[in-house]
Image (tube, grey):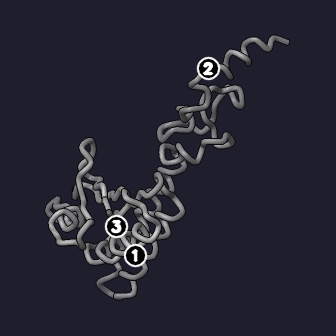
Amino acid sequence: MDFSTEIEIHQNPNYKTQLCKNWGRLGCGHCRYGPKCQFIHPEDPGYMEVYPETWHFAREQKAHSQYVQHLHAQKTVNLFYKEHIDKKVREWNAAHPKGPNYYDFHGLTTKLADFYIFDIICVMKSAKIQKSWIETDRGNHSKANFAAIRSNFLTNNFPPGVSFVPVPCNDGILCLTVV
């Protein structure tokens, strides 16, 4: 049995640091190398850190988005649906974090986003967290392609020490700073 190859693999500084393309968003969910693959698979430690890049996450995110859109269609009939939308988005963020202190506001109305952001600011202050990231999107799916939540956060007056700054590489994400 030749252990030299296995030793070389484990000495590779990039070993199990990136998601296997077969488990990525466009992957098939099967890797012919199995546990010997040099990339991260669902059974490997570190998988949860790359989970937002997986097809599992993409499928769950699509189902969540469709469900929230369905709730939006119902909210004109029954105001209960607004509360349900808020609950579902908060549950999604708790169960599917894209990273520490990262919040996805897709599906929220501007009013619900205001309530949620104030709750996040309170948590940040009590836990002494200085930065969080808020994904608001660019407004591509909003009426007249207007990013209402993003614009609201950037133009409204928040308490002193609270600021929002667009992330340079992605204007659909805001960096929330609380000092």
Q: Out of 107 and 160, give the one closest to the viewer.
A: 160
- How far apart are the alpha carbons under marks 1 and 3? 8 Å
User: At label 2, which amino acid type do we have?
Assistant: Asn
Which residue is denoted by mark 3 in the rendering?
Answer: 107
**Nearest to N terminus: mark 1 or mark 3:** 1
Residue placed at 23% from the left, 52% from the top?
166
Tell me: 97 left or right of 47. Answer: left
Give coordinates of residue 177: x percent, y percent.
31, 59
Of the residues tagged 2 and 1, which is closer to the observer?
Answer: 2
Of the residues tagged 3 and 2, which is closer to the observer?
Answer: 2
> What kind of element bears circle 2?
loop
User: At label 3, which amino acid type do we have?
Assistant: Gly
Residue placed at 33% from the left, 57% from the top?
135
Give coordinates of residue 176: x percent, y percent.
31, 59
Q: Out of 130 and 155, give the one closest to the viewer.
A: 130
- How far apart are the alpha carbons under marks 2 and 1? 45 Å
Query: Does residue 63 lie above or below 11 as drawn?
Result: below
Tell me: 146 left or right of 136. Answer: left
Which residue is denoted by mark 2 in the rendering?
Answer: 12
Give coordinates of residue 102: x percent, y percent.
41, 57
Q: Out of 112 and 21, give the one closest to the viewer.
A: 112
Tell me: 107 left or right of 91. Answer: left
Which residue is denoted by mark 1 in the rendering?
Answer: 86
**Nearest to N terminus: mark 3 or mark 2:** 2
Q: Quadrant of residue 75?
A: bottom left
